[in-house]
Image: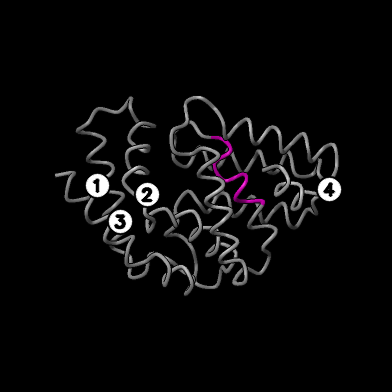
Amino acid sequence: MLTGWLAEAGESPAAEAVGAELVARWSEAHRRYHTLTHLTAVLAAVDRLADVADDPRAVRLAAWFHDAVYDGRPGWDEERSAQLAQSRLPRCGVPPARIAEVARLVRLTAAHDTLTGTDRNGAVLCDADLAVLGGDGYEEYAARIRQEYAHVPDDLFRQGRAQILRRLLAVPQLYRTPQARELWERRARANMSAELATLG
């Protein structure tokens, strides 16, 4: 897995150390969905959509950092992950402009519906992050999300989860790139609608 990281961050001892730190973060014991499996899936989805991005390298670096800090605190986790990128990427020799773009992209994943129509890098990262919604493993994904929020009582979780699903279903197009819409849009809407029906 670190081979892919080093291809983006550069072959240096500093990049190796940062990559090892990221793998350790994504492997934390409290994670159930936001794990190395999710990271691998997001990177694979980025590869499928990379031709759309203006800076595919920035998008891939952002994928590595987008949930690197994960405490189950929406907004806070993304901000801390962006800060982590800003503190670690200079050690790898990544240019300042690309670091700024990576941090912006990581922050964007806190609320995918804030994406603007001209943000090609953001479209690729957000679509890749949401690819799971249109995949075969949706039920397992939903179960793992519930496990990550095991501390939240059932009624509150159902209420919050239903609110998220309704917001996602309300947008005219869940995915921003034509490729992602073709690959995942119909299945994602069916998956989310089925889950929403179980939440009461």
> Where does label 1 land, which residue?
162
For the residue marked with disc 1, what is the amino acid?
Ala
Report helix, strand or loop for mark 1. Answer: helix
Q: Position of residue 128 (x, y in %)?
A: 51, 58
Comes first in the chain, label 2 or label 3: 2
Label 1 vs label 4: CA separation?
Answer: 43 Å
Which stretch did the figure color magenta?
61-69
Q: Nearer the viewer, residue 157 or 49?
A: 49
Please state which amino acid type lies under the numbered disc 2.
Gly
**Disc on the earlier residue, 4 or 2:** 4
Q: On the picture, is 157 further left or further right than 48?
A: left
Label 4 neighbour load within 10 Å: few <14, some 14-19, many 20+: some
Q: Are marks 1 and 3 in contact (CB under 8 Å)?
A: no
Label 3 amino acid? Arg
Specify the amino acid type for callout 4.
Gly
Q: How many numbered discs, if any?
A: 4
Q: Which residue is mark 4?
A: 93
Q: Is residue 56 magenta?
A: no
Where does the N terminus fall, quadrant-wise? top right
Residue at the disc numbered 2: 137
Q: Assess whether mark 3 and mark 4 are in contact (beta carbons under 8 angstroms).
A: no
Give the residue displayed 75% in from the left and 57% down from the top. Answer: 97
The span from disc 1 to disc 3 (Cα, nearest Å) is 9 Å
From the viewer's perspective, tell me whether residue 132 is left or right of residue 27.
left
Question: Which one is earlier in the sequence, the residue at label 4 or at label 3?
Answer: 4
Element at badge 3? helix
Closer to the N terminus: mark 1 or mark 3?
1
Specify which label sits upstream in the sequence, 1 or 4: 4
In which quarter of the view is residue 92 placed? top right
Q: Which residue is mark 3?
A: 167
